[in-house]
Image: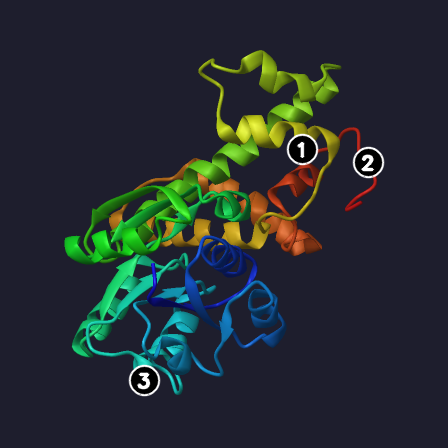
Amino acid sequence: MTETVALIGAGAMGGAIGARLVATGTRLAVFDLDREKVAALVAQGAVAAATGAEATAGARAVILSLNAAHIVRAAVFGAGGVAEGAAPGTLIIDMSSIDPEATKALAQEAASRGLRWVDSPLSGGIPKAATGELTLMQGGAEADVAEAQAVLARVASNQTRMGGPGAGQTTKLINQVLCGLGFLAVAEATALAEAAGVDAAMIPKALKGGRADSAILQEYMPRFASRDYRRTGRIDNMVKDLNGAADLARLTQTPMPLTALCAEVHRMLTAAGLGGEDQAALMEFFKGPRKELFQ
């Protein structure tokens, strides 16, 4: 790939995506309000831009990795934003996790300005970005999604078009419902194993290949058991996503009692000051053997 790709947002996830793109030969122009985050990617081979418009000028595609719909809107349509520097027909790939209805509105506004929009939220987090094995769920016109998939082929091993604009974000909310419930279930099972005197770290091996097996079980039960709270995600981001799922449930009149309970547990941990911690800190919700926090 010889054309430049622009990256707007170089936080934890955007930085990981950018690092993978640069490492695999993509010419990357990057903008973020945090200049230290930009500098980290520049040190790896990216080119710094002073504004989103500057990063976008001449880019084949623009990748967004931001935290909320209002930030996405400002980054694209605000002063000095992507829309100011984008040539007609530029493809915008939003890898943020935001509301599906907001995404539809953003895609419509982009189209009114002659720009193309694909929502492409992700699953797999920083570890999978580093190895090029992200799972991406995408919404947009078929041809636009196909082009986005070519741009993102070096960071993702599984890309699926789910439908029109917003369909990727809807699928991401479903993904987060499953992940949120999965994290909480495995944490609860870890607490039970510890209370009953069973070595929880051995359970993933014992259950491997059975119906209870999952990627979350294999990765997180050993971390729960050892109180390994290394940060690869954030509890408060899960709150945001579960709130989004609740909004969609209200819109569609879908009962989701387990998701509501899961969201409440995450809110309690956030209120207790653990919102910036990894999902492994769910163990703080349960009584039982504890090790020193955040070693």
The residue lying at 33 percent from left, 72 percent from top is 59
Q: Earlier in the sequence, mark 3 or mark 2?
A: 3
Q: Which residue is found at the position 60% from the left and 16% from the top?
A: 205
Q: Horizontal and vertical percent for residue 270?
A: 63, 53
Residue where numbered disc 1 is placed: 223
Q: Amino acid at mark 2?
A: Lys
Q: Is residue 141 visible?
A: no
Quadrant of the rendering where the C terminus is positioned: top right
The residue wearing badge 3 is: 84
Quadrant of the image occupied by residue 257: top left
Q: Residue at x 20, y 70 (%)?
A: 108
Q: Secondary structure at mark 2?
A: loop
149 left or right, relative to 124: left
Q: Which residue is mark 2?
A: 291
From where the camera sits, is residue 133 visible? Answer: yes
Q: Earlier in the sequence, mark 1 or mark 2?
A: 1
Mark 1–mark 2 CB contact (< 8 Å): no
- The residue mark sitting in front, 3 or 2, is 3
